[in-house]
Amino acid sequence: MVEENRTPPLDALIVGAGFAGMYMLHKLRQLGLSVRVLEAAKDVGGTWYWNRYPGARCDVPSMEYSFSFSDEMQQQWNWTEVMAAQPEILEYAGQVADRFELRSSIQFETRVTDVTYDEAQCSWRVATDAGEVFQSRFCIMATGCLSVTNTPVIEGAKSFVGAIYHTGEWPHDGVDFTGKSVGIIGTGSSGIQAIPEIAKQAAHLTVFQRTPNYTMPAHNKPLTDEYQQEAKSNYADIRQQQRESLAGIIGYGFGFGGAEPTEPTDELLQTTASERMALVDKKGFGAIHRFMDIGLDMNANEMACDMYREQLSRVVDDAETAQGLMPRNYPIGCKRPVIDTQYYQTFNRDNVTLVDLRQGGIERITETGIQTEQGAFDFDVLIYATGFDAMTGALLQMNICGRDGVALSKAWEAGPRTYLGLQVHGFPNLFMITGPGSPSVLSNMMVSIEQHVDWISDCIGHMEQNQLRTIEATAPAVEEWVAHVNEVADGNMMTVPSCNSWYLGANIPGKPRIFMPYVGGVGVYRQKCDEVVSNGYEGFELANSKK
Ligand code: FAD
Ligand code: NAP
């Protein structure tokens, strides 16, 4: 570490300049604090800076996946589609930075490598890959839940001679697939968005699918001015409803988009087989939307899966390919919902081949393609759509070391343990935005980001006013919160034994299998956070001097 590069002490250092880091910077500046943001990328935007693969877009209505904190901004910004594509969201992020003149406080192309608590100073020492060292009283991790890509270790991976891309680190100049044969591994949200777009351009596309997903048609379409004006005139109400909702989405835009805004009320278990088939005839994949017991009862869920597979077999022409695409042996609702545009129809194209790895897995990557137990497949370009080391990946990469020299990796050896997803015992004055143990990835992230940023800046404001130096989650508070997070997750479709999702860390070999987000809902969670404050920051220890 190069001590000459130590910079003057800061009040707050933020890591990450996605939506969370940008809003945090804006709020802390308003408190009059000295703040610096360190960001590995060349510009703002986070997720939307890195994930530029063809077809990348939001699956939350644009009118809802946007900041609410500035009414002037939400009134002036115009979205072009019900669910915006990546370039438009990145442009939106750029105008947030411009409007609030954020870039002057952001140091780009700077990766944080070490974060150590200095007990004598009650402050954090943050080192970067450029050898700089920052000292800051508060350290705020806005490092994102899906910002560390996962590239599976497959034998021979380095021997492939063609171009290799990961959807989460896509080249900024795009990729021209014209005349190329392409192989893609992965059929999560990223793969399902990219596959139809790449198939339109490539000479041939081979899709390597380990687990088929349940995916619903997105029904995306352009927004009209009339609709947008109506939404804007109701914004105060829409935003309030979002904040009080389960997932931060009220479906305002979906109604316009063509998909039905649905309030599940009926029981699928009460229907007959012929009624279920009649529903599939009428509504296709949408046939299962209105049944509330799908999320509660495994038999109802399996009925829904049958209806889903029936519709899939109607959309995909080739019977064997349809069978290959059918999800089985795990419930609908176990993984993050996926929505798509012409995904299954893409497999009706002559230039697309499905390799269902359930029939024989990948053996190794070769110089020219992938060798599976079913045979060899050759191509010019290999794409990993293999996801992320979610929720804990970015935090654990930074070698965070807290009080008494305890590493975060040690404290989280058996899985993440937080109080409210905001703080960890033993790591004073260090906050996480949308950390594990908060609704986070189960919600419209913009709503959860705003709530966390507001909470953290109010907390820091309170400390400033009361000359308090440190805040730290107590051990019993963490204990109780972790127990509560597990209790509410128990019995949920996302935690059944047959479910292997990144919510559980199941996509990363060796990662502890713990359900990481809080399923209680953003409205309930917000209330709990507010109660903690009104009870004098219950569960936190606030101190006015160095320990
Ligand atoms: P990010 O946008 O991930 O930003 C974190 C930043 O921290 C990154 O720029 C990263 O470079 C930086 N960083 C991390 N570690 C370091 C380090 N050590 N040093 C320096 N910088 C660092 N959410 C939804 O609610 N709806 C959606 O439709 C939706 N679609 C998505 C689509 C994709 C393809 C992906 C990957 C995610 C999607 N998400 C969606 C989740 C999305 O991540 C959030 O909505 C939101 O953009 C997160 O913002 P953030 O600022 O918290 O994190
Ligand atoms: P993902 O959901 O984790 O999907 C990764 C895919 O790669 C899975 O199909 C997985 O198969 C496969 N895979 C991983 N390792 C493999 C291996 N060794 N061999 C074969 N297949 C392998 O990742 P993602 O698609 O990038 O999505 C991650 C999250 O980002 C989403 O859940 C969502 O939150 C967000 N996102 C949102 C959108 C959107 O619509 N707005 C778009 C993209 C991403 P298994 O299932 O068998 O592990």
Image (spheres, grey):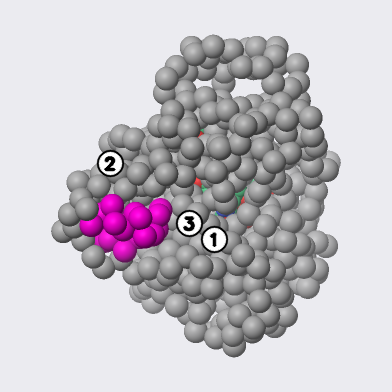
Residue 260 within the magenta-colored segment of the rendering:
no
Considering the whole magenta stretch, tell me its main secondary structure: helix
Q: Residue furthest bottom?
A: 233
Label disc, if present, on residue 339 of the rendered structure? none
Whether label 3 touches label 1, CB < 8 Å: no
Amino acid type, label 1: His
Residue 27 drawn at (x, y percent): 65, 71
Does residue 384 appear anywhere in the picture? Answer: no
Category of crowding for the residue at label 3, using alpha-carbon neighbours closer than 10 angstroms: few (below 14), some (14–19), many (at least 20):
many
If you read the primary sequence from the N terminus, does the residue marked by circle 2 or circle 1 appear first?
1
Marks 2 and 1, Cα distance to the nearest angstrom? 30 Å
Q: Which residues are magenta?
A: 275-296
The residue carrying mark 3 has its beta carbon less than 8 Å from ligand 1: no
Q: Is residue 294 above or below residue 523?
A: above
Give the total number of marks visible in the rendering.
3
Kind of residue at disc 2: Val
